[in-house]
Image (tube, helix red, strand yellow):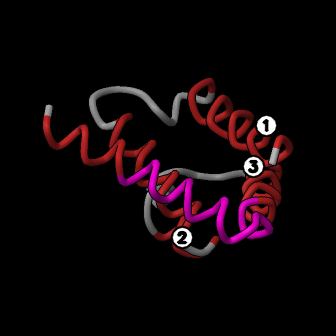
Amino acid sequence: MKRSGALLLAALTVLCTCGLVTGEDSEELFMDFLQTLLVGSIEELYEGPLSKYNINADAKAAIAELKSCIDGLQPMHKAELVKLLVQVLGSQDDA
């Protein structure tokens, strides 16, 4: 669990420092990215939240590793992450 958390943090740091997450759409991109990472496929990441970005080979490898770690989580842990994401999305709708 520590490894996938560290990988997620690293991936999000890369997104932020590379300028992919800027402007008013950053929160929406972040949440779409997380949701797809948790319950979608690699292809859905590239066709969805990352579709307008040119992702280099090293970043694609990192995303594949991250997705593999998340997919390797115990079902209970993955379900809890999905619940947390739903709570976060719900609290944004209330704002």
Mark 1 residue element: helix
Q: Residue furthest front?
A: 76
Mark 3 nearby-residue class (10 Å; few <14, some 14–19, many ≥20): some
Instruction: Please indicate whether residue 33 sits to the left or right of residue 12 in the image.
Output: left
Residue 55: within the magenta?
no
The three-letter code of the residue at mark 1 reads Ala
Q: Is residue 20 above or below residue 34?
A: above
Q: Which residue is mark 3?
A: 59
Q: Is residue 46 above or below residue 13?
A: below
Nearer to us of marks 3 and 1 is 1
Question: Which residue is depicted at the point 61% across and 29% down?
Answer: 18
Instruction: Please indicate whether residue 94 sits to the left or right of residue 11 in the image.
Output: left
Mark 2 nearby-residue class (10 Å; few <14, some 14–19, many ≥20): some
Q: Earlier in the sequence, mark 3 or mark 2?
A: 2
Q: Earlier in the sequence, mark 1 or mark 2?
A: 1
Question: Which residue is depicted at the point 78% across and 42% down?
Answer: 7
- Contact flag, marks 1 and 2 (Cβ < 8 Å): no
Q: Nearer the viewer, residue 12 or 95?
A: 95
The three-letter code of the residue at mark 2 reads Val
C-alpha gap between disc 3 and disc 1:
15 Å
C-alpha gap between disc 1 and disc 2:
19 Å
Which segment is the magenta one?
70-86
Q: Which residue is mark 1?
A: 6
Q: Which numbered disc covers residue 39?
A: 2
Mark 2 residue element: helix
- Contact flag, marks 3 and 2 (Cβ < 8 Å): no
Residue 63 % position (x, y): 73, 55
Question: Which residue is depicted at the point 83% across and 41% down?
Answer: 2
The quadrant in which the C terminus is found is: top left
Instruction: Please indicate whether residue 46 sits to the left or right of residue 68 in the image.
Output: left
Q: Earlier in the sequence, mark 3 or mark 1?
A: 1
The three-letter code of the residue at mark 3 reads Ala
